[in-house]
Image (spheres, helix red, strand yellow):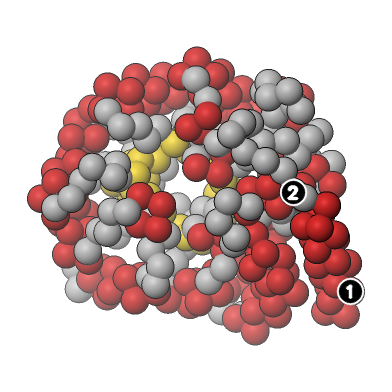
C-alpha cells in the first residue's frame, strides 16, 4: 500500500467500529462498512480514531481490526490512529500496523502537554518512536484534548519533523489557521496536506481556505466526497448547495455525547452496519431522539430531490 504523502487529497472517512448488541466486535459489519465507505466515494479510511471508539478497545482488538480493514481495503490508503498516553504503546501499535500495510499513523496530543516546548518536543519523540519512514498525521483537536497548538508551534513542528505530512485540522475556531498555513507555504515553508474534521460542519469554508479535503465521519459520506469534489474544481455554489441539504443532520450530530449514536443509527438504517450499538460505556438514542433523526432524514430526502 502506498504511504501517505504531503499531497494527499480527498476524503478519508473516520470509520466507526461496529459492535453487536452484547459488545463484541461485529466482524461482518466491519467488512460491510469498509465497502460502504469506498462505494460512497471515500479516497481512504482512518480507523481507531475517537469516533471509532478506540479507547474502548484492547491492544489486541486494535491490531485485529487494523489487519482486517487494511486487507479489506485492497490497496486503498488506511490511516491508523495510534494515540496513547505513553510512547511505548504508540510505538508497538504503530510498528504493527505499518507492517500490515497502513498508509500512516495518526497521533494527537495527550492532555499532559502544558507548554509550547512540550508540544513541539512531543512530536519529535513520536517520530523517533515510530521510525523515520512512518508518515504521521498530526491531529489538532483542542476541544477534545485540551491542548492548544499555536500557529508558531505548529510551524516549528512542520519545519523540524518531516514525518508529519498531514494535519487533521479540528481547531475551532480554526479557519484562520488554514489560511496562515497556506500563506506560510506560499512563502517557502514545506507543504503538508490539510484534511479537516469536526464532523464536516465547516467543510465548504475549510475547502475555500485551502484545505485538501476531509478526515471526518458522517452517516452520508457521499456528501463529504461530493462537497470536496465540487470545491476542488472551484464549483463552490454546487458544493454549498449539497452541503446545505445535509446541514440539519450534520448539526444534530454535533451534540457532545450523542453524535456517535446518531451516526451509528443512520449507518445501521442504511444497512452499512448490523447494529447501532456503542460499546459500554455508551448509550444509544432515546425514542425521542430517534423520532427527531427520522424527521431530519425525511426532510433531507425532500431537499435532495428538489436539488437534483
Residue that carries the numbered disc 2 in the rendered image:
285
The residue shown at (58%, 51%) is 257
Location of residue 42 in the rendering, given as x and y in whole percent from the top left corner: 64, 50
The quadrant of the rendering that contains the C terminus is bottom right
For image coordinates 83% across by 52% down, the residue present is 287
Residue nearer the viewer, 130 or 26: 26
Q: Residue at x 77, y 50 (%)?
A: 286
Which of labels 2 and 1 is toward the front? 2
Instruction: Examine the rendering and report whether any part of residue 229 can be seen.
Output: no
Q: How many other residues sit within 10 Å of disc 1, few (<14), some (14-19) or many (≥20)? A: few
Q: Please, which residue is most extreme toward the top here?
A: 60
Total number of numbered discs in the rendering: 2
54 or 46: which is nearer to us?
A: 54
Labels 2 & 1 near each other (Cβ < 8 A) = no
Q: Position of residue 68 (x, y in %)?
A: 61, 22
Between 226 and 247, the one nearer to me in the picture: 247
Classify 97 as above or below 267. above
- The disc placed on residue 302 is 1
Q: Is residue 78 left or right of residue 31?
A: left
User: Where is residue 55 shown, x and y percent of the image?
Assistant: 48, 32
Q: Is residue 224 left or right of residue 274?
A: left
x and y, in percent, of residue 60 in the image = 50, 15
Q: Is residue 193 above or below residue 34?
A: below
- In the visual, does 281 lie left or right of 80? right
Which element carries disc 2, helix, strand or loop? loop
Classify mark 2: residues with Cα within 10 Å, few (<14), some (14-19) or many (20+). some
Q: If you read the primary sequence from the N terminus, does the residue marked by circle 2 or circle 1 appear first?
A: 2
In which quadrant of the rendered view does residue 178 lie? bottom left
Residue, far left: 117
Amino acid at each position: 500500500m502506498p504511504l501517505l504523502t504531503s499531497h494527499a487529497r480527498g476524503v478519508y472517512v473516520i470509520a466507526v467500529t461496529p459492535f453487536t448488541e452484547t459488545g463484541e466486535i461485529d466482524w461482518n459489519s466491519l467488512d460491510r462498512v469498509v465497502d460502504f465507505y469506498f462505494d460512497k466515494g471515500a479516497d481512504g479510511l482512518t480507523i481507531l480514531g475517537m469516533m471509532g471508539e478506540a479507547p474502548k478497545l484492547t491492544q489486541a482488538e486494535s491490531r485485529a481490526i487494523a489487519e482486517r480493514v487494511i486487507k479489506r481495503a485492497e490497496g486503498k490508503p488506511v490511516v491508523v490512529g495510534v494515540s496513547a498516553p505513553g510512547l511505548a504503546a504508540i510505538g508497538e501499535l504503530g510498528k504493527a500496523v505499518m507492517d500490515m500495510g497502513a498508509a500512516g499513523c495518526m497521533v494527537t496530543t495527550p492532555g499532559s502537554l502544558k507548554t509550547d516546548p512540550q508540544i513541539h518536543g512531543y512530536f519529535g519523540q513520536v517520530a523517533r518512536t515510530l521510525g523515520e519512514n512512518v508518515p504521521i498525521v498530526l491531529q489538532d483537536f483542542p476541544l477534545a484534548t485540551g491542548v492548544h497548538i499555536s500557529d508558531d508551534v505548529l510551524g516549528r513542528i512542520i519545519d523540524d519533523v518531516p514525518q508529519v505530512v498531514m494535519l487533521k485540522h479540528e481547531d475551532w475556531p480554526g479557519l484562520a489557521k488554514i489560511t496562515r498555513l497556506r500563506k506560510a507555504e506560499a512563502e517557502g515553508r514545506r507543504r503538508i496536506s490539510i484534511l479537516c474534521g469536526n464532523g464536516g460542519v465547516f467543510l465548504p469554508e475549510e475547502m475555500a481556505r485551502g484545505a485538501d479535503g476531509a478526515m471526518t465521519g458522517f452517516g452520508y459520506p457521499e456528501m463529504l466526497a461530493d462537497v470536496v469534489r465540487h470545491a476542488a474544481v472551484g464549483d463552490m455554489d454546487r458544493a454549498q448547495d449539497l452541503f446545505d441539504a445535509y446541514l440539519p443532520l450534520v448539526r444534530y450530530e454535533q451534540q457532545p455525547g450523542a453524535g456517535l449514536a446518531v451516526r451509528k443509527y443512520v449507518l445501521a438504517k442504511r444497512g452499512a452496519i448490523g447494529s447501532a450499538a456503542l460499546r459500554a460505556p455508551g448509550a444509544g438514542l432515546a425514542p425521542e431522539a430517534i423520532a427527531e433523526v427520522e424527521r431530519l432524514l425525511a426532510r433531507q430526502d425532500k431537499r435532495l430531490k428538489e436539488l437534483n
